[in-house]
Image (tube, rainbow, N blue to C red):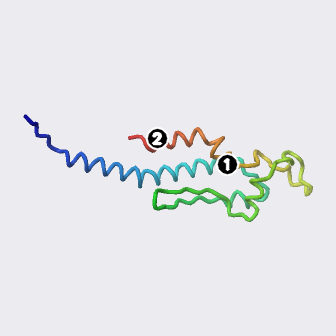
Amino acid sequence: MGVKVKGIRRVKSNINLELQDIANNRTARVLTEVAITGAKYAALLTPIKSSTLINSQYRQLHKLSDGYEARVGYSANYAAAVNAAKGTLKGKPRPDGSGNYWDPNAEPDFLRKGFEVDGAQEIQEVIRRGYKI
């Protein structure tokens, strides 16, 4: 003898709504928060001489056909060169007397380190918290 179960359509509908929320709204929020968190840590490692580089930091969120993409970067023309610098002058005085290279807490490869080293633990927590059901 079969048992009638009521509410199957509603359960399926609610599951689909939850999956859509995860794939769209929740993912956009989580990626935005990840970008903000990583950018915060990258800013702490960014060299500051005239504030041009640090003030050129930007973040973007793009919807793609198969998800979202978050980007953090620097729009200053020389940003890529500074980020890729070896850091061999770190701590040495600048010729113009305006402090030391890579001061006060700056490091080469600051953008990657902001996300993958210094901010990694907080970013993992943001993701965990963002997708908690």
In the image, 51: left or right of 32? right
Residue 51 placement (x, y as % from top left): 74, 58
Instruction: Specify the farthest residue to the right.
Output: 95
Residue nearer the viewer, 3 or 43: 3
Q: Between marks 2 and 1, how big is the CA–CA gap? A: 23 Å
What residue is shown with label 2?
A: 129
Residue 39 placement (x, y as % from top left): 62, 51
User: Which image quarter holds the C terminus?
Assistant: top left
What residue is shown with label 1?
A: 112
Category of crowding for the residue at label 2, using alpha-carbon neighbours closer than 10 angstroms: few (below 14), some (14–19), many (at least 20): few
Going 31% across and 51% down the picture, which residue do you hit? 17
Which numbered dot is residue 84? none
Tell me which numbered mark, 2 or 1, is placed earlier along the sequence. 1
Category of crowding for the residue at label 1, using alpha-carbon neighbours closer than 10 angstroms: few (below 14), some (14–19), many (at least 20): some
User: Which image quarter holds the N terminus?
Assistant: top left
Residue nearer the viewer, 46 or 7: 7
Instruction: Specify the farthest residue to the bottom.
Output: 77
Residue 97 placement (x, y as % from top left): 90, 54
Going 57% across and 40% down the picture, which residue do you hit? 122
Judge whether 2 appears above or below 17 on screen: above
Judge whether 80 appears above or below 4 on screen: below
- SS of the residue at dot 2? helix
Residue type highlighted by circle 1: Arg
Judge whether 116 appears above or below 76 on screen: above
